[in-house]
Amino acid sequence: MLKALNKCVIPGPVGELETIVVLPQGEPQGIAVICHPNPLQGGTNTNKVVQTAAKALSQLGYACYCPNLRGVGESGGQHDHGVGEVEDVIAVVEHARTVHGQLPLALAGFSFGGFVAARTRAVIEADKLLLMGVAVGKYEIPTPPVPANTLVIHGEEDEVIPLSAVLDWARPQDLPVLVFPGAGHFFHGKLIKLGQMIQRCW
């Protein structure tokens, strides 16, 4: 269980958004919104990769918001395959800024959540973007290009999103991809190192 973990309900565009908040160590230095994997495969805000990222970023001073996006858990609405979820993330960002002010913003996500985070970054400004096992090539809507300072982390042996697909997406952008040797999609056995790598490369 993470320290300083709270739960709140945030008003969203199609209903309330059930959200886990991991408070920063010390005074907040930034805000991070971290998106969960595909709920059609059981993804929620309690996912271990999401929570690993929240722990790592909270230790760097970020107030981390991990929402259940529309139709997930107790959140209102219906799953919208990464379209309406962008509006949900924006609603969480706006709520977080009413609490913490105009601090630097990080958007992050795992798998489907990375797809949502990248699409959100195409709509609103963010200082940092973290994509873990990002689901490129899985949906009708393409994953958009991302800023040059985006941290992309992928497992060498990802069985859900092949590393080759991520490299094909990253190559035209001249975007580096940090590869975890031997890691699958869910970073089993690699979560501690994943958290350390996020902090080291941030």
Image (cartoon, helix red, strand yellow):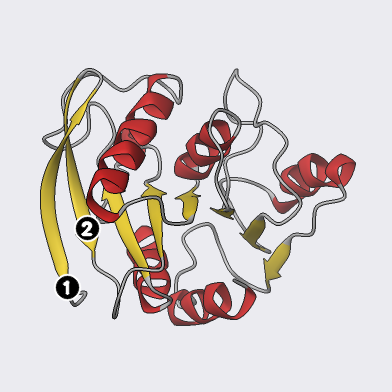
Which sits in the foreground, 70 or 166? 70
Q: Is residue 119 left or right of residue 177?
A: left
Q: Is residue 166 above or below residue 26?
A: above
The residue that disc 1 covers is 4
Q: Is residue 56 above or below residue 103?
A: below
Viewport quadrant of the N terminus: bottom left
Q: Is residue 186 above or below residue 17?
A: below
Q: Is residue 62 left or right of residue 22?
A: right
Residue ID at (39%, 37%): 38
Q: Position of residue 165 (x, y in %)?
A: 74, 42
Q: Position of residue 125 (x, y in %)?
A: 56, 39
Residue ID at (54%, 72%): 198
Name the outermost residue toward the front. Answer: 101
How far apart marks 2 and 1 lie (CA) works out to: 8 Å
- Amino acid found under the numbered disc labelled 2: Val
Q: How many marks?
A: 2
How packed mark 1 is, by other alpha carbons closer than 10 Å (few <14, some 14-19, many 20 or more), is few
| Residue 132 appearing in the image | no
The residue that disc 2 covers is 21
Q: Position of residue 23 (x, y in %)?
A: 24, 68
Residue ID at (41%, 74%): 56
Residue 190 got which mark? none
Which sits in the foreground, 116 or 103? 103
